[in-house]
């Protein structure tokens, strides 16, 4: 986790990613349900007039297969330029795609998503028919299934957009050697009748050669079966990215089953799945403001972190720490392993293992005994080459290593599957989508990593895919990150940011309806309001926002920024019902010795700069300080509808759990972020240099930082009860 935050220059270059054009068709299989066959969804992800990006979704409708082939022809001059997730061949107008070694084996209902870029002139007409054939797992001969295009899909499955050709996983030839072990998390799970659960399989270290892994139900309840992931491959490119294994429950069985994961030379590991009786809930209606009249789920992992610090404190501070541990904080799904918990999610207190997503959801349902609406908050945060302008929060996926495919298939799909099993509950699942990503495309295009993120389309395509998958679940509410006032506040940044946000949302199947609102201040710690001055008031003939600290940014706090963002987003085409959220977990700035109690008298502060420095409650020397900054305090407690004058501010929330580190620095890890170095410096858009103002001895991002937590609690404003 977690965040980066740069003060953006007043002038920014907007880079647009790929978008979905309304040219989609799904070809339905004519094969009998009992026979082998496949169907293909044809979807143009983006079309720029002289070229387009295409995604196909190949679905196995019959028994397990070991390979697939798709063929079709164009009527125009569409010319293949590059393809990925399949072997693409063009001969004249005819296109043939065959599986790669790593995506040919599909269980019943399994999918593969090959994609490609084409150029063309004239009209880009979709093919009138697509043929799909498969190779059965039990037979070497393919079974052709012609698939006419007479029935377009009303809701095509989104998938990859322009991205480099993924590196195929080599044919499995390896085996486990000394020290190499299989891992499966979570080790136990439950799944209701008629539902599907998912667990992850990985290795503890990189193998020297690719290893074939087999997953099977070996004993116990026969009502459970492996619906996808029975055969997977662990390689040097994916060993640390848990691969999903889906377990389906029938409609009548109950009880436990043992699932065995095995590979040549490896000690097998087992997972226990327990089938439970089907639930009786109904799908709830989708609320305009999910926070109204709802309780909040409290993450027990965070409670344990806060209690660990409280145990080392005393008196008022200890009780305040315990109180903070009872507050709702968001659950960060900041790597694939976080979905499954256990050994792949060991970053809590002293390296303790954090809980799986499914276990958290079940705990929330159990805790909500009244059946009243309950907020279950999560963060979606694992784009390829994410957070391209920082180092502390770089993630596990890379564009070069098929990152978008892993993001969609191994990250978003399992999350969506798990969440869908809880859509007939009273939970209101609030998902914050990819902090920092789209804001970086607006302002940081000059940086190599950000330019690569834009040109590949992984940010826009990944977010579109996530929005599609999550919006399809009735009780999920999507909120997209809009950085903060010190990043996108300038009109030259806000205007293109709004356009990009609308472009991404409009490209989804549901359009702008796939977005319930937006969140600010997760990526930094700007105060909700500056109570003792406004951006436009004059002291010596110059407005407040002209001083170097604000650099002509007309929004000096988050409330005015969110109000302006709301107005502009609605004007751009978003619903007037969208809600704004502000993350108040670290924006209190309450050090009593530094916090002003009123505006400085203009007889004392005779210049605008002096007035701002003495009157602002933001205690940092530079608004760009973001990594564990000194003197920060916890802000307002999580609450719904906190401002009666701005009713579209739906809630204050704590997305960043107070006390979890923003990142470490090179002296500690060798690969840390200089912004986290207490002896480091940084510059603003005008070339001025500032100290980072970071607390020393910070642990890696997401790990518990007791010193920071103590400071956040002590300096909280309002004071902690």
Image: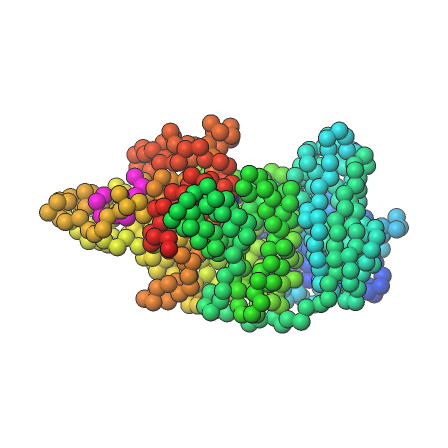
Q: Relative to residue 559, is residue 438 drawn left or right?
A: right
Q: In front here: 221 or 321?
A: 321
What colouring style does the render use? rainbow
Q: Relative to residue 176, is residue 710 drawn left or right?
A: left
The main secondary structure of the magenta stretch is loop
Which residue: 34% across, 46% down?
715
Q: Is any part of residue 243 visible from this angle?
A: no
- Across and down, in percent, residue 400 comes to 60, 38
Which residue: 53% across, 48% down?
304
Which residue: 18% across, 42% down?
610
- Across and down, in percent, residue 134 comes to 81, 53
Q: Say above or below: 426 vs 140.
A: below
Q: Is residue 339 magenta?
A: no
Q: Is any part of residue 639 visible from this angle?
A: yes
Q: In front here: 86 or 73?
A: 86
Q: In front here: 586 or 20?
A: 586
- Across and down, in percent, residue 614 comes to 21, 45
**Which region of the structure is painted magenta?**
613-621
Q: Residue furthest front?
A: 315
- Across and down, in percent, residue 9 comes to 35, 42
Total marks shown come to 0
Q: Relative to residue 162, is residue 551 drawn left or right?
A: left
Q: Say above or below: 181 vs 148.
A: above
Q: In front here: 378 or 411?
A: 378
């Amino acid at each position: 986790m977690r965040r980066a935050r740069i003060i953006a220059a007043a002038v920014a270059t907007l880079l647009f990613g790929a978008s979905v054009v309304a040219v989609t068709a799904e070809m339905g299989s004519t094969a009998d349900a009992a026979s082998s066959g496949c169907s293909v969804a044809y979807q143009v992800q983006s079309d720029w007039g002289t070229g387009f990006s295409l995604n196909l979704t190949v679905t196995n409708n019959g028994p397990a297969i070991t390979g697939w082939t798709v063929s079709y022809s164009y009527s125009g001059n569409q010319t293949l330029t590059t393809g990925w997730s399949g072997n693409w061949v063009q001969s004249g107008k005819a296109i043939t795609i065959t599986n790669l070694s790593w995506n040919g084996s599909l269980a019943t209902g399994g999918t593969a998503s090959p994609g490609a870029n084409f150029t063309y002139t004239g009209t880009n007409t979709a093919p009138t028919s697509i043929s799909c054939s498969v190779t059965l797992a039990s037979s070497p001969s393919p079974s052709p299934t012609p698939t006419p295009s007479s029935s377009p899909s009303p809701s095509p499955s989104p998938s990859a957009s322009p991205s480099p050709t993924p590196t195929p996983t080599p044919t499995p030839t390896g085996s486990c050697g000394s020290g190499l072990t299989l891992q499966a998390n979570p080790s136990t799970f439950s799944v209701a009748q008629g539902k599907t659960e998912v667990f992850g399989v990985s290795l503890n270290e990189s193998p020297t050669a690719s290893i074939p892994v087999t997953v099977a139900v070996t004993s116990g309840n026969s009502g459970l079966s492996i619906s996808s992931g029975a055969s997977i491959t662990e390689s040097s490119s994916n060993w640390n990215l848990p691969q999903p294994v889906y377990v389906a429950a029938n409609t009548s069985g109950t009880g436990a089953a043992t699932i065995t994961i095995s590979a040549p030379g490896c000690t097998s590991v087992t997972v226990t799945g327990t089938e439970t009786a089907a639930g009786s809930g109904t799908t709830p209606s989708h609320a305009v403001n999910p926070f109204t009249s709802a309780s909040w789920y409290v993450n027990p992992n965070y409670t344990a972190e806060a209690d660990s610090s409280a145990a080392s404190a005393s008196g008022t501070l200890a009780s305040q720490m315990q109180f903070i541990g009872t507050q709702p904080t968001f659950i960060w799904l900041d790597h694939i392993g976080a979905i499954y918990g256990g050994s792949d999610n060991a970053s809590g207190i002293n390296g303790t293992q954090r809980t799986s997503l499914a276990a958290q959801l079940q705990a929330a349902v159990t805790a909500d005994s009244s059946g009243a609406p309950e907020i279950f908050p999560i963060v979606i945060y694992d784009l390829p080459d994410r957070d391209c302008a920082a180092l502390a929060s770089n993630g596990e996926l890379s564009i070069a290593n098929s990152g978008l495919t892993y993001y969609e298939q191994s990250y978003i799909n399992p999350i969506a599957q798990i969440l869908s099993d809880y859509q007939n509950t009273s939970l209101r699942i609030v998902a914050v989508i990819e902090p920092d990503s789209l804001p970086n495309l607006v302002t940081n295009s000059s940086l190599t990593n950000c330019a690569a993120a834009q040109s590949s389309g992984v940010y826009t395509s990944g977010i579109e895919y996530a929005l599609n998958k999550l919006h399809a679940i009735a009780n999920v509410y999507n909120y997209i990150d809009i950085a903060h006032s010190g990043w996108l506040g300038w009109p030259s940044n806000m205007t293109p940011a709004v356009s990009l946000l609308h472009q991404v949302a409009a490209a989804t199947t549901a359009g702008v309806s796939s977005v319930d609102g937006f969140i600010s201040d997760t990526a930094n710690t700007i105060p909700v309001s500056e109570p003792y001055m406004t951006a436009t008031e004059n002291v010596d003939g110059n407005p407040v926002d002209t001083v170097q600290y604000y650099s002509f940014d007309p929004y000096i706090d988050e409330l005015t920024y969110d109000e302006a963002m709301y107005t502009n987003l609605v004007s751009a085409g978003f619903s007037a019902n969208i809600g704004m959220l502000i993350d108040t977990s670290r924006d209190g700035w309450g050090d009593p010795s530094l916090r002003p109690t009123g505006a400085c008298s203009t007889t004392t502060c005779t210049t605008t700069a002096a007035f701002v420095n003495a009157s602002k409650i933001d205690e940092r020397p530079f608004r760009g300080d973001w990594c564990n900054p000194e003197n920060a305090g916890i802000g307002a407690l999580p609450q719904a509808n906190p401002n009666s004058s701005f009713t579209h501010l739906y809630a204050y929330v704590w997305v960043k759990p107070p006390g979890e580190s923003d990142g470490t620095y090179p002296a500690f890890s060798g690969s840390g972020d200089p912004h986290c170095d207490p002896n480091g410096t940084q510059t603003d858009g005008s070339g001025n240099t500032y100290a980072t103002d970071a607390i020393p001895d910070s642990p890696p991002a997401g790990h518990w930082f007791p010193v920071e937590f103590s400071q956040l609690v002590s300096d909280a404003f309002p004071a902690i009860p």
